């Protein structure tokens, strides 16, 4: 066997047996294969769940779906950074350090191992009404005509896949804060930019004027750096901040 075939990878995984239980680390040694990603490592562990001490254990629980960096479900903290397991290549990680370390996102409750409950993000989308009501019982005709630059901005905002990386790196998202997070603010900006969605911009802005809303953003700008889809989150936060100010002034003048 050549050296490449004999090469192995040390993989350190943060485990947790159930909600609320104490976490612990386990280390596995996996045979190196070309073009492996982190999902490949977890699949190899599932096929042979034996630690470096020779202890047989349960396969690591994690969430994944598309395996194409589209669905956002496989977000994890990999070598200290929040990113997608499906498109994080092992060889690139080994260039950073000799061991691959995988942990769950820390800003969400752990269900088990690397699988977290991201309900807070979906609840935030409900709060800002991140949808456009459409009457599907009658003909809706052609869509509204928009300027190309507006369409381009909306496309960039629509790339959000609700992965949670922006919340993971945001210092304002913590157990002491009610901050709704950059993801929901970005989606509120997206739907307020749509000609039809703008009809419900008032309730969206009012939701973001409540405690935990736009004013709780500390402008750390970590979110835009961590976003795997390059969503212009800081632009969206700035726009929503201006829009909420104007909305508050109009509301005061109309009293």
Image (cartoon, rainbow, N blue to C red):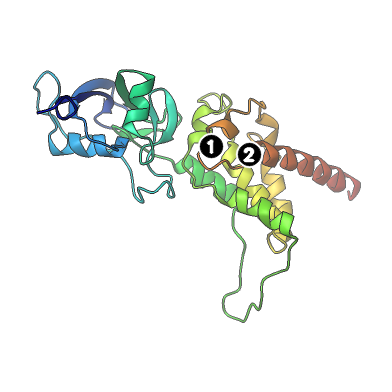
Estimate how packed mark 2 is, as few (under 14), some (14 to 19) or many (20 or more) residues with alpha carbons within 10 Å: many
Number of marks present in the image shown: 2
Of residues 29 and 115, the one nearer the viewer is 29
What residue do we see at 63% from left, 34% from top?
Answer: 212
Note whether 96 is above or below 188 in the view shown: above
Estimate how packed mark 1 is, as few (under 14), some (14 to 19) or many (20 or more) residues with alpha carbons within 10 Å: many
What residue do we see at 22% from left, 22% from top?
Answer: 26
Is residue 178 in view from this perspective? no
Contact between labelled residues 1 and 2, with CB atoms less than 8 Å apart:
yes
- Mark 2, secondary structure of its residue: helix
Q: Which residue is mark 2?
A: 233
Q: Which residue is mark 1?
A: 227
User: Residue 102 at x, y = what percent?
Assistant: 33, 27
Most distant residue in the front direction: 2
Q: Earlier in the sequence, mark 2 or mark 1?
A: 1
Of residues 141 and 151, the one nearer the viewer is 151
């Amino acid at each position: 066997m050549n050296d490449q075939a004999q090469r192995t990878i040390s993989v350190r995984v943060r485990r947790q047996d159930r909600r609320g239980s104490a976490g612990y680390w386990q280390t596995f040694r996996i045979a190196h294969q070309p073009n492996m990603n982190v999902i490949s490592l977890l699949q190899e562990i599932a096929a042979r769940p034996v630690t470096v001490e020779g202890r047989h254990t349960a396969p690591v629980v994690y969430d994944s779906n598309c395996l194409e960096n589209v669905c956002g479900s496989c977000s994890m903290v990999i070598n200290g950074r929040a990113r997608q397991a499906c498109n994080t290549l092992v060889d690139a990680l080994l260039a950073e350090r000799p061991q691959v370390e995988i942990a769950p996102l820390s800003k969400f409750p752990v269900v088990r191992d690397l699988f977290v409950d991201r309900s807070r993000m979906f609840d935030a989308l409900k709060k800002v009404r991140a949808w456009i009501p459409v009457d599907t019982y009658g003909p809706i005709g052609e869509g509204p005509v928009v300027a190309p630059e507006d369409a381009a901005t909306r496309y960039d905002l629509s790339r959000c896949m609700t992965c949670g990386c922006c919340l993971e790196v945001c210092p304002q998202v913590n157990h002491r804060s009610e901050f709704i997070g950059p993801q929901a603010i970005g989606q509120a900006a997206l739907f307020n930019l749509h000609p039809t969605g703008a009809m419900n911009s008032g309730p969206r802005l009012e939701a973001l004027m409540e405690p935990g809303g736009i004013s709780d953003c500390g402008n750390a700008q970590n979110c835009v750096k961590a976003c795997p889809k390059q969503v212009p989150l800081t632009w969206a936060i700035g726009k929503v901040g201006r829009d909420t100010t104007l909305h508050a002034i109009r509301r005061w003048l109309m009293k």
